[in-house]
């Protein structure tokens, strides 16, 4: 009977919770019993084989939009969905338009339902089998709210850009460069919290309790999607004497991968399983140096080591900000001390710092595709000091391409989302794949607005269009 058991919930989810929209463009329908509105938690799922080991929830909004989750705890399979619901008399009609699992059927289904106090019972026949679903709903005090915080890591490293969602609500956040997230003012109650990032396995933490005037901490480890290998390569150099270091030992910690730099100071490690690692470089007479790296399947990662001779203090640094003429930060500018190995990339806020530069006077170049190269001459570096150097780069005139991808909080593409480059005539609408491409956009920095009926409007600021180059933006809309 196990095979039968698996097939039924696969269809039921799509039927019952009916509501994941690939094209969230379906307008919410009228005629919804407002007693159905709220976040309902699945208590029991019963079919002809008896009560099954399923958990989940469904959130129904006043305008009929639905979203939720259904989990087979025994088989460790999870489905998320969203869609629309209407009711008439004792019949609840659910329309599922999209889902993140092939086994959730798309279609419209009818259920007999009853609400008694805080209990919702749904009964229906699915594929000739009678099913009963029992949900319960708390009545949260809207004045009782708490916070959720934590750190997301992959291996030993913090992971940036992880989407953290309080399922069944519109509350979400993305982790920063330290892997940290904070979601405030969540109504008190018990929730499931989902952690997701492209290239990594999704993780859902169930039964997360949010209490009034308290902060709940949930730290999470997520793993890179299994499969595939990559490589890492680079060089080792004496940062003071500006010579390559031959025979430096390169080792990926907690693995058997190790090698030594060759006669040109270069090393190469291949067939490393995809994942996050710490790689170190050791050589007698130099301070040990380590770097955090991420090995990506079928790709080569660069990791260069600038080694400082033991006991050396004869160095300084250069730091500052890189902006455009309007004072807006420019990210990923290569800041290079000419004639030396020392360099840095500018961060999101335009800041950079070049370390371990031998005392002296240098020319420093600033380069990025789409910008005119800038060279600042005669920059003095002192022992133990930091020279401040702020610069402005001028974009090269021309046009570029803007490629937009829009999805909902369940990582499902949104069809029909309106995209507008503000203060221009550029507008567009996403396809069924959630994408739209703007061609021949004049170079510059823009604000891009993304909107869709039933979702919160999002403005993405400082979208940089460079001459002859594509720019990508990824937008998640919440409803």
Image (cartoon, rainbow, N blue to C red):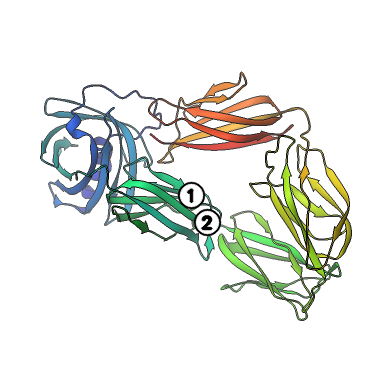
Q: Give SS at disc 2.
A: loop
Q: Position of residue 20 (x, y in %)?
A: 34, 35
Residue 226 in the image, given as x and y percentages of width and height: 49, 57
Position of 44 relative to 38 (above/below) = below
Instruction: Specify the quadrant of the image occupied by residue 306.
Output: bottom right
Give the answer, above or below, for where 253 lies relative to 172: below
In the image, what residue occupies the spot 14% across and 51% down? 51
Q: Is residue 90 left or right of residue 236?
A: left
Residue 260 image point, x, y percent? 74, 73
Q: Are marks 1 and 2 in contact (CB under 8 Å)?
A: yes
The residue positioned 71% from the left and 29% from the top of the image is: 443
Name which of mark 1 and mark 2 comes first in the sequence: 2
Does 250 sit left or right of 86 as displayed? right
Please state if 345 lies on the left or on the right of 227 as rendered.
Answer: right
Q: Nearer the viewer, residue 259 or 343?
A: 343
Instruction: Classify 10 Å Cα crowding around label 2: few (below 14), some (14-19), many (20 and above).
Output: many
Q: CA distance from mark 1 to mark 2?
A: 9 Å
The residue shown at (28%, 33%) is 61
Instruction: Residue 222: tell me if it is visible.
Output: no
Pick whichever, 355 or 205, lies toward us: 355
Q: Which mark is residue 441?
A: none
Q: Secondary structure at mark 1?
A: loop
The residue identified by callout 1 is 197
Residue 192 seen anywhere in this rendered image of the structure: yes
Which residue is at 60% across, 74% downward?
256
Say the numbered circle drawn on residue 159: 2
Toward the left, the furthest residue is 116
């Amino acid at each position: 009977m196990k095979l039968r058991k698996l097939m039924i919930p696969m269809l039921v989810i799509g039927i019952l919770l009916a509501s994941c929209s690939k094209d969230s463009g379906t307008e919410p329908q009228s005629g919804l019993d407002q007693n159905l509105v709220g976040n309902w938690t699945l208590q029991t799922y019963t079919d002809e084989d008896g009560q099954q080991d399923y958990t989940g929830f469904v959130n129904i909004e006043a305008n009929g939009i639905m979203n939720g989750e259904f989990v087979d705890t025994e088989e460790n399979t999870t489905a998320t969905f969203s869609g629309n619901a209407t009711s008439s008399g004792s019949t609840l009609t659910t329309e599922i338009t999209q889902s993140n699992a092939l086994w959730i059927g798309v279609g419209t289904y009818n259920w007999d339902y009853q609400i008694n106090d805080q209990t919702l019972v749904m009964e229906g026949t699915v594929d000739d089998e009678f099913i009963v679903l029992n949900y319960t709903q708390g009545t949260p005090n809207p004045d009782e709210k708490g916070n959720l915080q934590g750190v997301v890591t992959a291996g030993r490293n913090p992971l940036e850009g992880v989407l953290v969602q309080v399922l069944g609500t519109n509350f979400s956040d993305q982790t920063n460069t330290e892997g940290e997230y904070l979601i405030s003012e969540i109504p008190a109650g018990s929730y499931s919290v989902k952690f997701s990032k492209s290239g990594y396995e999704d993780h859902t933490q169930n039964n997360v309790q949010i209490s009034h005037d308290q902060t709940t901490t949930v730290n999470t480890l997520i793993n890179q999607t299994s499969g595939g290998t990559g490589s890492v390569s680079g060089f080792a150099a004496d940062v003071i004497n500006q010579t390559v270091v031959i025979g430096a030992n390169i080792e990926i910690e907690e693995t058997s991968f190790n090698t030594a730099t060759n006669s040109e100071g270069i090393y190469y490690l291949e067939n490393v399983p995809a994942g996050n690692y710490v790689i170190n470089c050791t050589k007698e007479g130099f301070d040990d140096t380590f770097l955090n790296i991420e090995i990506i399947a079928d790709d080569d990662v660069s990791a260069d080591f600038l080694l400082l001779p033991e006991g050396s203090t004869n160095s300084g640094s250069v730091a500052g900000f890189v902006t455009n003429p309007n004072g807006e930060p420019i990210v990923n500018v290569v800041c290079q001390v000419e004639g030396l190995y020392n360099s840095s990339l500018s961060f999101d806020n335009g800041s950079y710092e070049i370390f371990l530069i031998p005392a002296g006077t240098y020319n420093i170049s600033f380069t990025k595709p789409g910008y005119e190269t800038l060279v600042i001459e005669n920059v003095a570096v002192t022992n133990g000091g930091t020279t401040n150097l702020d610069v402005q780069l001028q974009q090269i005139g021309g046009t570029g391409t803007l490629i937009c991808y829009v999805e909902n909080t369940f990582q499902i593409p949104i069809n029909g989302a309106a995209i507008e480059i503000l203060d221009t005539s550029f507008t567009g609408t996403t396809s069924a794949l959630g994408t739209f491409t703007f061609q021949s956009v004049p170079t510059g920095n823009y604000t891009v607005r993304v909107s869709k009926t039933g979702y919160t409007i999002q403005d993405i600021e400082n979208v940089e269009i460079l001459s002859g180059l594509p720019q990508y933006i990824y937008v998640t809309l919440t409803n």
